[in-house]
Amino acid sequence: MQGIQSINIAVNSEEREDMSNYHDMEMRVVYARTLKELIERDPAVYCLEADLGKADASIPEISKHHPGNFINCGVQEANMIGVGAGLAKEGKIPFCATFTAFATRRCYDQITISVAYANNNVKIVGNSPGITQGPNGGTHMCFQDLSIMRAMPNMHVYSPADANELRSVMFHMAASKQPTYMQLVRLKMPKLFEEGAPFDPNQAKRLHEGKDVTLVATGFMTRFALDVARLLAKEGVTVDLLHYPSVKPFDAKTLIESAQKTGTVVTVENQNIIGGLGSAVCEVLSERHPVRVKRLGIPDQFGEVADPDYLFNKHGFGLEHIAQACRELSRSKSKKL
Amino acid sequence: MTREQLDSLAAEFRYVVTDAICRSGVGHIGGVMSLVEIVVTLYFRIMKVKPENPDWPDRDRLVLSKGHAGPIVYTALAYKGYFPKAWLTTINQNGTRLPSHMDQILTPGVEITAGSLGQGLSCACGMALAAKHDGKKHRVFCIIGDGESDEGQIWEAALFAAHHRLDNLIVICDYNKMQIDGRTEEIMNLEPLVDKWRAFGWETFEINGHDWDAIHNTIRKADAVTGRPAMIVAHTIKGKGNRETEGLVDCHNVKIPDETTYQRIMCGLECKYDLPY
């Protein structure tokens, strides 16, 4: 994989008349509509739910139009993963969705053995990652899914940032035979990519060109990182913003090239700073190009019932925190490590 | 096959699988020996398979959810011709394709990786559901353990299979009434086990899991059930067929550290056979 993909950043979000204006929809609706489209292209694609079909919008989108490809397992996440593995063994392509906490940490051993270790082609979808679980609070607010899924051999881990990228990622998942975990932001997300934007798990996407500091983001946080890059440009601090739709595999080459140019790196993620995107960045840089890194995210704490702004401020990874970290590191990068 | 031929094959399997396990110095002899008649019946009297084409789409499937009994299935697969019998000497050796617990990637004829208990039955449900959706006529057999039945996932799958009316799924519970730490009635009582499965919506059968006719006839009856999955609770004896292990609580995972122990265990078997490798 050479170089960085040419990405068209949307300059506005003008409404279109046709149904493909996915950015006017919640991401979960885009998920369900895309899955419906995938089923219509390939009847081997299945939608599995664990009594959260309404939250994932597959009810009624798929349950109504393709009831034969819709399997509601009830509140049985572990069994859903096993049923998915059995379907995959028979050539089906199951997308198993539930909230991130239940999609990963609750059935981690089932995913490990029945999916990853056995290399069964199961797609696991974690709805409402990190702080986006707001009203459900600490029991549902999973900050370690990127970390624990990344630590699983044979597992790809994706976190798309907008509706068009979500669609590209899902088309890739349906076409590949790779066991995969994908974070699904349930909310409506602002447009970052054009429809049909390419997705390659081995390639990061540069969303803003800069030379003063590298900013690395994924999933829900990328939109905020882009706002920071645009804000700091007005201050004369240029940010090299790298978006990683795939946290595993991880595009080390693009990161190293950027770090060589800027000399310092800030990471931001909607996760515990232990084990996720920031850790992936540190693993690469510490071994191949040591520079100063600042990780922003949840500082090893559990969640709570709260809105995003409250949690951004409490844990220090909102817009202003990201901007301040970028300013500080760009100023201090000449200092030795 | 005549009863004499079946008895002879079972005795030979017990001799060969015990030797094969002993070569690695340790193994799950107890739960392997309790399954001999059931596995022989499935592979030599019931299941439609093509060893020369392990992925034949219309084959019957067997999922060994109690994956630690892998060596008895390996023995059956070797005798059916899926791979050379000499492979049996590699069980649990470095670089083997026959690990103690079932591995669908490593071993020809193994359908589903299993070993972390409770998971195989869910996979079998997925396979049975796929067959129904595709209008396939093949059957999915699944063997679970009694100790394994402590796992909540077994009962999740029990609900699921009944809800989806998976009448192409036939499950056999190897009810040898022992688990690692002791007797099931002492560690985690399962009774009334048959009633539980019936209450979950399954057609239930109860047999002596070492009785050739009972196993064969009951599987055929279970195969004829429509509209619901079938559970055959097979009363078995852990470590069956070796006086060094039969009925002993501590025969789950037997250590064979030296030649003396090996000779003692091999002499505990009913008959001696020439090893096929």
Image (cartoon, rainbow, N blue to C red):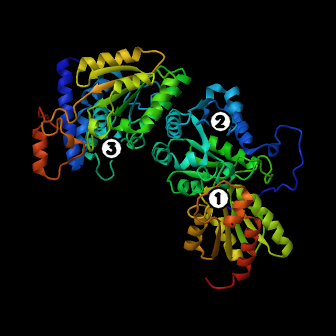
Q: Mark 1 to mark 2: distance in Å?
A: 37 Å
* Res A112 visible: yes
**In front of the other: label 2 or label 3?**
2
**Residue A318 percent across, percent down from the top left:** 73, 64
Q: Which mark is residue A1?
A: 1
* Residue kind at label 2, given as amino acid type: Gly
Q: Tag 1's secondary structure?
A: loop
Q: Name the residue that disc number 2 marks.
A: A53
* Residue kind at label 3, given as amino acid type: Leu
Mark 1 or mark 2: which comes first in sequence?
1
Q: Chain of mark 2?
A: A
Q: Looking at the figure, which quarter contains the C terminus of chain B?
A: top left
CB under 8 Å between callouts 1 and 3? no
CB under 8 Å between callouts 1 and 2? no
Q: Are the residues under badges 2 and 3 in a single subunit?
A: no
- Give whichever of A5, A126 is nearer the camera: A126
Direction front: furthest residue: A305
Name the residue rendered at 26%, 33% in the picture: B177
Image-based side of B115 in relation to B90, left or right: right
CB under 8 Å between callouts 2 and 3? no
**Residue A265 percent across, percent down from the top left:** 67, 72
Image-based side of A12 in relation to B198, left or right: right
Q: Name the residue that disc number 3 marks.
A: B98
Question: Residue B190 appears in which quarter of the rendering?
Answer: top left
Q: Chain of mark 3?
A: B
* Residue kind at label 1, given as amino acid type: Met
* Res B45 visible: no
